[in-house]
Image: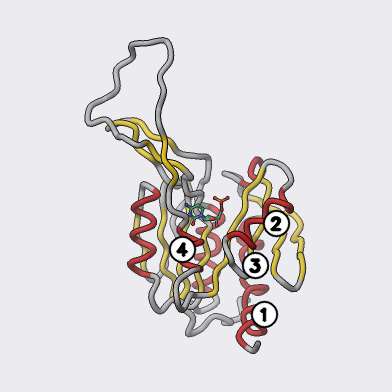
Amino acid sequence: FTPKLLVGKKILITAGATMEMLDPVRGITNLSSGKMGFALAKVAMHMGAEVTLVYGHTTAAQPLVTHAFHASAASEMHATVMHHIADQDIFIGVAAVADYSPVLTAEQKIKKSEETLTIQLKRNRDILAEVAALPDPPYCVGFAAETEQVLEHARHKRLAKRIPVIIANKANTALGSDNNSVTIIDETGEYPLSSADKTSIASKILTHLYQHLSSFNNN
Ligand code: C5P
């Protein structure tokens, strides 16, 4: 039984990994599978929300949602999110978005020559921080996947990105796995959810967000 807590709410969710192309056949990506973002999208649909999913590279089965758009590079994901963000009530950034992309993408396959090869990278735009800085932003939720000092880094990111909620998880156990254990961090406190399958975690996260959003809107 899933309570229809999110009827009338529009939610945009990013999921999966981005891919920054070095040449036509190679790219820089990461181990995100899309499972956590897809689980949130699926449960949000069950809770009655209108869900827009912007997904990168994934290995999981895509859930049925209201609108779905594929985006490969971080810049494409940025453009796709910005195109669909107006009128959204909630934005959940679950995608593992590349922080850097190559300054140049070679038009042809890069040939091996010297013993070492240097690739110059430039910073990508932070989609979540930009959405949170919009004049009338949706309620923004971030994920922090860290390999060490998980809670400290997550707390810092919530403040740096100026978002009401961040969900901390351990990168090495969360990425690609069917299970996850997370800590929800908002201005009222820190709420650990012990390890469970990503659908159960998604359900608990969305119920928490619904309750927090209700009190948030009343302040
Ligand atoms: O700063 P960091 O990449 O660790 O932050 C992770 C959070 O920010 C995730 O919610 C991720 O989806 C989002 N993010 C983003 N755009 C970026 C980098 C991260 O939306 N360029």
Please tell me whether residue 100 is drawn above or below residue 151 in the rendered image: above
Q: At 31% across and 34% down in the image, what residue appears?
A: 104
Say which residue label 3 marks: 205
* Separation of residues labelled 4 and 1 (CA atoms): 25 Å
**Label 4 CB sits under 8 Å from any ligand 1 atom:** yes
Please tell me whether residue 8 is drawn above or below residue 106 in the rendered image: below
Q: At 38% across and 40% down in the image, what residue appears?
A: 20
Percent from the top left, x then y, of residue 188?
A: 75, 73
Q: At 51% across and 60% down in the image, what residue appears?
A: 93
Amino acid carrying label 3: it is Ile
**Horizontal arrangement in the rendering, residue 188 relative to residue 13 (left or right):** right
Amino acid carrying label 1: it is Gln
Numbered tag placed on residue 176 in the rendering: none
**Horizontal arrangement in the rendering, residue 198 relative to residue 123 (left or right):** right
* Separation of residues labelled 4 and 3 (CA atoms): 23 Å
Percent from the top left, x then y, of residue 178?
A: 61, 49
**Horizontal arrangement in the rendering, residue 199 relative to residue 34 (left or right):** right
Which one is closest to the eye, mark 4 or mark 3? Answer: 4
Q: Is there a contact, CB below 8 Å, between mark 2 and mark 3? A: yes
**Horizontal arrangement in the rendering, residue 141 relative to residue 24 (left or right):** right
Q: Dot 4: what SS? A: helix
In this view of the protein, which residue sits in the foreground, 158 or 8? Answer: 158
Amino acid carrying label 2: it is Val
Say which residue label 4 marks: 130
